[in-house]
Image (cartoon, helix red, strand yellow):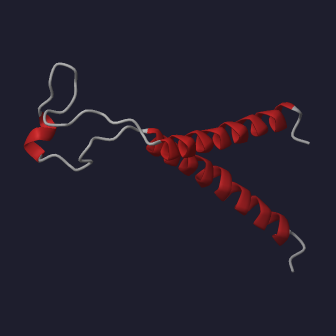
Amino acid sequence: MSDFIEWGALGQVLVAGVLVGAGIPALFALGLRLLAGTTPDDGAAPAAEQTSQDATGRTAGSGPIVRPTPARFAGGVLCMAVVIAAIATGLVFVISGGH
């Protein structure tokens, strides 16, 4: 044991930093992916088709956008709700003086 470093507190800060610094953004990205519409084939278009776009800005050859299934929508909303709750909790903690 060291007289200068509290290893337990350092471990708690490390775990909290990893959860907040990587976990919340990853959860946000997962929520966006679950909420994103998909194309019917969901495959990559050939390189020649990826560069040509029509007047609406969509890639030529891409099919219509399909809405997510109800299970994906519910999962995406749940991910976003957790992210919003984490942000609100952090704001309340900071505004209250951090105690």
Quadrant of the image containing the N terminus: bottom right
Q: Residue at x 58, y 39 (%)?
A: 77
- Comparing 95 with 25, the one in front is 25
- Comparing 89 with 98, the one in front is 89
Counting from the top left corner in percent of width and height, residue 13 is at 76, 59
Q: Residue at x 84, y 69 (%)?
A: 8
Counting from the top left corner in percent of width and height, residue 70 is at 50, 41
Q: Residue furthest front?
A: 70
Q: Is residue 52 visible?
A: yes
Question: Looking at the rendering, which quadrant does residue 15 occupy?
Answer: bottom right
Question: Height in image: 57 above or below 27?
Answer: above
Q: Is residue 29 visible?
A: no
Question: Height in image: 38 above or below 16?
Answer: above
Horizontal arrangement in the rendering, residue 3 relative to residue 44 (left or right)? right
The number of numbered discs placed on residues in the rendered structure image is 0
Horizontal arrangement in the rendering, residue 49 relative to residue 7 (left or right)? left
Question: Looking at the rendering, which quadrant does residue 48 occupy?
Answer: top left
Q: Residue at x 21, y 36 (%)?
A: 63
- Comparing 37 with 7, the one in front is 37
Quadrant of the image containing the C terminus: top right
Q: Residue furthest left?
A: 48
Q: Residue at x 30, y 34 (%)?
A: 65
Question: Height in image: 29 above or below 5?
Answer: above
Q: Residue furthest top?
A: 55
Counting from the top left corner in percent of width and height, residue 4 is at 87, 69
